[in-house]
Amino acid sequence: MDIYNDLSSRFVVESKQLGATEEELNQLRAISPIDVPSEYAEIVKQATDLEINVDSSMYLRIWGPSRCIELNEAHNVHMYMPHSLAIGDDEGGRGLFYLSGKSGFGLYVTGFGNLDIDEAEYLAPTLNDLLKNNVGVERLLEY
Protein backbone atom coordinates (compact mmCIF):
# COMPACT_ATOMS: atom_id res chain seq x y z
CA MET A 1 0.00 0.00 0.00
CA ASP A 2 1.29 3.42 -0.91
CA ILE A 3 0.38 5.40 2.19
CA TYR A 4 0.37 8.61 0.18
CA ASN A 5 -1.66 7.56 -2.86
CA ASP A 6 -3.89 4.69 -1.74
CA LEU A 7 -5.57 6.25 1.30
CA SER A 8 -9.31 6.74 1.23
CA SER A 9 -10.38 10.38 1.13
CA ARG A 10 -11.58 9.95 4.73
CA PHE A 11 -7.94 9.77 5.89
CA VAL A 12 -5.28 12.48 5.63
CA VAL A 13 -1.66 12.00 6.73
CA GLU A 14 -0.82 15.12 8.70
CA SER A 15 2.47 14.15 10.29
CA LYS A 16 5.09 11.47 9.78
CA GLN A 17 8.65 10.46 10.54
CA LEU A 18 11.22 8.70 8.39
CA GLY A 19 10.49 5.17 7.25
CA ALA A 20 11.60 2.14 9.24
CA THR A 21 14.68 0.17 8.36
CA GLU A 22 14.71 -3.57 7.83
CA GLU A 23 16.77 -3.84 11.03
CA GLU A 24 14.02 -2.09 13.03
CA LEU A 25 11.41 -4.39 11.51
CA ASN A 26 13.52 -7.43 12.38
CA GLN A 27 13.76 -6.24 15.99
CA LEU A 28 9.96 -6.02 16.11
CA ARG A 29 9.59 -9.45 14.49
CA ALA A 30 11.92 -10.88 17.14
CA ILE A 31 9.74 -9.78 20.07
CA SER A 32 6.29 -10.00 18.48
CA PRO A 33 4.14 -12.96 19.55
CA ILE A 34 2.44 -12.86 16.13
CA ASP A 35 3.85 -12.72 12.62
CA VAL A 36 4.15 -9.02 11.84
CA PRO A 37 1.75 -8.51 8.93
CA SER A 38 3.45 -7.56 5.68
CA GLU A 39 0.99 -4.71 5.12
CA TYR A 40 2.19 -3.06 8.34
CA ALA A 41 5.82 -3.50 7.24
CA GLU A 42 5.06 -1.98 3.81
CA ILE A 43 3.47 1.10 5.38
CA VAL A 44 6.15 1.77 8.00
CA LYS A 45 8.94 1.37 5.45
CA GLN A 46 7.46 4.48 3.81
CA ALA A 47 6.93 6.47 7.02
CA THR A 48 6.65 5.89 10.76
CA ASP A 49 4.70 7.48 13.57
CA LEU A 50 2.04 8.52 11.10
CA GLU A 51 -0.62 10.86 12.43
CA ILE A 52 -3.68 10.35 10.28
CA ASN A 53 -6.71 12.63 10.51
CA VAL A 54 -9.94 10.64 10.24
CA ASP A 55 -12.91 12.60 8.86
CA SER A 56 -11.68 15.72 10.68
CA SER A 57 -13.03 14.01 13.82
CA MET A 58 -10.12 12.15 15.35
CA TYR A 59 -6.54 11.07 14.83
CA LEU A 60 -5.13 7.63 14.31
CA ARG A 61 -1.43 7.04 14.83
CA ILE A 62 0.45 4.18 13.24
CA TRP A 63 3.67 3.63 15.18
CA GLY A 64 7.01 2.62 13.80
CA PRO A 65 8.62 -0.65 14.94
CA SER A 66 10.66 0.95 17.75
CA ARG A 67 7.59 2.64 19.20
CA CYS A 68 5.65 -0.64 18.91
CA ILE A 69 8.29 -2.40 20.96
CA GLU A 70 8.39 0.39 23.54
CA LEU A 71 4.64 0.73 24.02
CA ASN A 72 3.80 -2.98 23.89
CA GLU A 73 6.31 -3.44 26.73
CA ALA A 74 5.16 -0.33 28.65
CA HIS A 75 1.52 -1.48 28.62
CA ASN A 76 2.35 -5.19 29.16
CA VAL A 77 0.24 -5.94 26.10
CA HIS A 78 1.59 -9.47 25.66
CA MET A 79 0.75 -10.35 29.25
CA TYR A 80 -2.86 -9.13 29.05
CA MET A 81 -3.57 -9.92 25.40
CA PRO A 82 -1.37 -12.81 24.28
CA HIS A 83 -0.96 -13.28 20.55
CA SER A 84 -1.53 -9.62 19.80
CA LEU A 85 0.51 -6.63 18.70
CA ALA A 86 -0.38 -3.00 19.35
CA ILE A 87 0.57 -0.95 16.28
CA GLY A 88 -0.99 2.41 17.02
CA ASP A 89 -3.43 4.50 18.99
CA ASP A 90 -6.13 7.14 18.64
CA GLU A 91 -4.36 9.77 20.77
CA GLY A 92 -7.17 9.29 23.27
CA GLY A 93 -6.22 6.19 25.26
CA ARG A 94 -7.30 3.50 22.81
CA GLY A 95 -4.90 1.19 21.05
CA LEU A 96 -5.02 -0.33 17.59
CA PHE A 97 -4.12 -4.03 17.67
CA TYR A 98 -3.58 -6.94 15.36
CA LEU A 99 -5.01 -9.95 17.18
CA SER A 100 -7.09 -13.07 16.91
CA GLY A 101 -10.28 -12.14 18.70
CA LYS A 102 -13.95 -13.02 18.64
CA SER A 103 -14.21 -12.10 14.94
CA GLY A 104 -11.00 -13.85 13.88
CA PHE A 105 -7.65 -12.29 13.04
CA GLY A 106 -7.67 -8.62 12.16
CA LEU A 107 -7.56 -5.09 13.50
CA TYR A 108 -9.19 -4.39 16.83
CA VAL A 109 -9.41 -1.38 19.10
CA THR A 110 -9.59 -1.25 22.89
CA GLY A 111 -8.55 1.05 25.68
CA PHE A 112 -5.08 0.67 27.13
CA GLY A 113 -6.73 0.73 30.57
CA ASN A 114 -8.82 -2.34 29.65
CA LEU A 115 -6.52 -4.74 27.86
CA ASP A 116 -8.90 -7.67 27.57
CA ILE A 117 -9.13 -9.63 24.33
CA ASP A 118 -12.84 -10.26 24.98
CA GLU A 119 -13.51 -6.52 25.21
CA ALA A 120 -11.58 -5.54 22.08
CA GLU A 121 -13.82 -4.25 19.27
CA TYR A 122 -13.26 -5.61 15.78
CA LEU A 123 -12.59 -2.99 13.10
CA ALA A 124 -11.42 -4.63 9.90
CA PRO A 125 -9.69 -7.73 8.52
CA THR A 126 -6.61 -5.68 7.59
CA LEU A 127 -5.06 -2.25 7.96
CA ASN A 128 -5.35 -1.88 4.18
CA ASP A 129 -9.11 -2.53 4.39
CA LEU A 130 -9.44 0.21 6.98
CA LEU A 131 -7.25 2.82 5.29
CA LYS A 132 -8.08 2.14 1.64
CA ASN A 133 -11.63 0.80 1.69
CA ASN A 134 -13.07 2.42 4.85
CA VAL A 135 -13.92 -0.98 6.37
CA GLY A 136 -14.47 -0.33 10.07
CA VAL A 137 -14.06 3.45 9.93
CA GLU A 138 -17.57 4.07 11.29
CA ARG A 139 -16.92 1.73 14.20
CA LEU A 140 -13.60 3.49 14.84
CA LEU A 141 -15.35 6.87 14.95
CA GLU A 142 -18.18 5.70 17.23
CA TYR A 143 -16.11 3.69 19.70
Image (cartoon, rainbow, N blue to C red):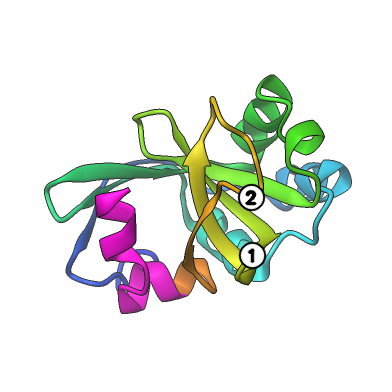
Judged left or right of residue 39, residue 94 is left
Q: Tell me what residue is drawn at x 85 percent, y 41 percent.
A: 31
Please name whichever residue, 129 or 3, is drawn nearer the observer in this view of the structure: 129
Which quadrant of the figure has residue 44?
bottom right
Q: Is residue 10 above or below residue 68?
A: below
Q: Tell me what residue is drawn at x 46 percent, y 72 percent.
A: 128
Q: Position of residue 94 (x, y in %)?
A: 44, 36
Amino acid type, residue under disc 2 in the picture = Asp
Q: Is residue 127 visible?
A: yes
Which segment did they paint magenta? Answer: 129-143
Q: Position of residue 29 (x, y in %)?
A: 81, 51
Q: Is residue 41 above or below residue 1?
A: above
Q: Which residue is mark 1?
A: 102
Q: Position of residue 71 (x, y in %)?
A: 63, 28
Q: Which mark is on residue 118? A: 2
Looking at the image, which residue sits at the far right?
30
Amino acid type, residue under disc 1 in the picture = Lys
Looking at the image, which residue sits at the far left?
56
SS of the residue under disc 1: loop
Judged left or right of residue 105, residue 15 is left
Q: Residues within 10 Å of mark 1 (few under 14, many from 20)?
A: few
Which quadrant of the figure has residue 104?
bottom right
Q: Position of residue 101 (x, y in %)?
A: 66, 61
Query: Which callout, 2 or 1, points at the residue further toward the start of the chain?
Result: 1
Is 7 covered by the magenta stretch? no
Instruction: Specify the principal SS of the magenta part.
Output: helix
Q: Is residue 13 above or below residue 128?
A: above
Is 136 covered by the magenta stretch? yes
Which quadrant of the figure has residue 78?
top right
Q: Tell me what residue is drawn at x 19 percent, y 64 percent.
A: 10
Query: Contact (CB < 8 A) between labels 2 and 1?
Result: yes
